[in-house]
Image (spheres, grey):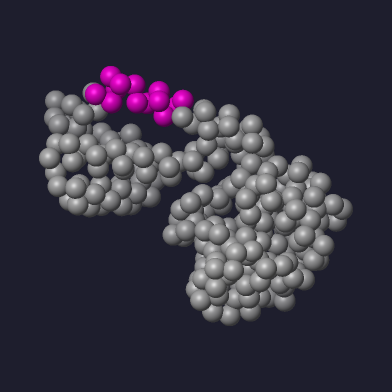
């Protein structure tokens, strides 16, 4: 447990709220040692109701550690505000904001860690990457891992790989949600009732996720479902003919390129 410190999370949106919930559930921090900075009064009220004992304010209070959970355009200013309030460590989860930008905003003597979490952090199953700024050392990375580890897995990556990680882990949930939408629509077109189609697809994704979780190669799992000349083979043949594999490769490449542009 982190004790004797004051952690401030700047930005009380979905990811900021997910971090607070994960940290409290994991016992990484106590409610009284966390402050959330949120500008919207309505959202502040929601967070106060959701997290008993957590302080929710509209200005950065004195702190030792800060998590930047703002929109990318606000990350540099939020970092400067955190440092002005005493933060000696800053962990940024603002997409596309480089360690160079964060280091410049933080100034001398402050350790910066850049992170890229994904949407599954909302349910404690996130996948995040971290990379150190110029002054961050092992203890700073370990601290960042303890924060993000409360809502999922954490990998250390060199910063040049962050754009690719963003394209897969960050954007990946949207690709899978799109597949779920398309499968549901296809099921309705072959005359399954809408409600049943939606239920089947939800259960399908839940089951597949558990099967992948044990580390089995997805190609092997696909083979287990695919009998020669069977129904699955017929469907996969259409996907191959339409070159869906290449479409996914192109999608990840486009997201990687866009991440580089934003950075």
Instruction: Pick whichever, 188 or 6, lies toward us.
Output: 188
Say how many tags the image has.
0
Name which quarter of the figure residue 166 lies in: top right
Is residue 240 located in the magenta-colored stretch of the structure?
yes
Q: Residue furthest top?
A: 241
User: Relative to 236, does residue 78 appear above or below in the rendering?
Assistant: below
* Left-right relation of 108 to 190: right
Percent across and percent down for residue 17 are 54, 64
Instruction: Pick the quarter of the image with the N terminus.
Output: bottom right
Q: Quadrant of residue 245?
A: top left
Residue drawn at the location 64% of the way across and 36% of the way down: 262
Q: Classify 254 as above or below 61.
A: above
Q: Specify whether 168 is left or right of 98.
A: left
The quadrant of the rendering that contains the C terminus is top right
Residue visible at 33% across and 39% down? 179
Residue in the image at 19% along x and 40% along y:
187
- Considering every residue shown, the one lying at the far right of the view is 108
- Magenta stretch prevailing secondary structure: helix
Instruction: In this rendered view, identify the residue nearer to me: 168 or 41.
Output: 41
**Residue 168 visible somewhere in the drawing:** yes
User: Which stretch is magenta?
Assistant: 238-250
Does the magenta portion include 9? Answer: no
**In this view of the protein, can residue 1 be seen by the observer?**
no
Q: Residue furthest front?
A: 41
Q: Is residue 236 above or below residue 241?
A: below
Q: Which x, y percent locates residue 227?
A: 17, 31
172 versus 76 height, above or below: above
Residue at coordinates 80% horizontally, 66% vertically from top-left? Answer: 85
Q: State left or right for residue 216 relative to residue 41.
A: left
Q: Position of residue 168 (x, y in %)?
A: 49, 38
């Amino acid at each position: 447990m982190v004790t004797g410190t004051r952690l401030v999370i700047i930005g009380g949106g979905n990811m900021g709220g997910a971090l607070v919930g994960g940290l409290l559930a994991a016992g990484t921090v106590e409610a009284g040692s966390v402050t959330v900075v949120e500008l919207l009064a309505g959202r502040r009220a929601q967070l106060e109701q959701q997290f008993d004992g957590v302080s929710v304010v509209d200005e950065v209070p004195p702190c030792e550690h800060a998590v930047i959970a703002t929109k990318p355009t606000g990350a540099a200013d939020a970092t400067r505000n955190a440092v002005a309030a005493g933060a000696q460590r800053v962990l940024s989860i603002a997409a596309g904001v480089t360690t160079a930008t964060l280091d410049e905003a933080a100034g001398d003597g402050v350790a910066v860690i850049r992170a890229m979490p994904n949407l599954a952090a909302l349910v404690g199953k996130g996948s995040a990457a971290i990379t150190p700024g110029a002054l961050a050392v092992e203890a700073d990375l370990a601290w960042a891992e303890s924060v993000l580890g409360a809502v999922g897995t954490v990998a250390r990556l060199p910063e040049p790989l962050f754009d690719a990680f963003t394209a897969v882990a960050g954007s990946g949930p949207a690709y899978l949600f799109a597949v779920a939408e398309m499968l549901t629509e296809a099921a309705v077109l072959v005359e399954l009732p809408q409600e049943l189609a939606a239920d089947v697809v939800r259960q399908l994704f839940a089951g597949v996720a558990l099967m992948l979780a044990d580390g089995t190669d997805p190609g092997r799992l696909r083979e287990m479902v695919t009998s020669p000349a069977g129904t699955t083979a017929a469907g996969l043949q259409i996907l191959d003919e339409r070159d869906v594999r290449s479409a996914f490769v192109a999608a990840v490449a486009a997201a990687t390129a866009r991440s580089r542009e934003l950075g």
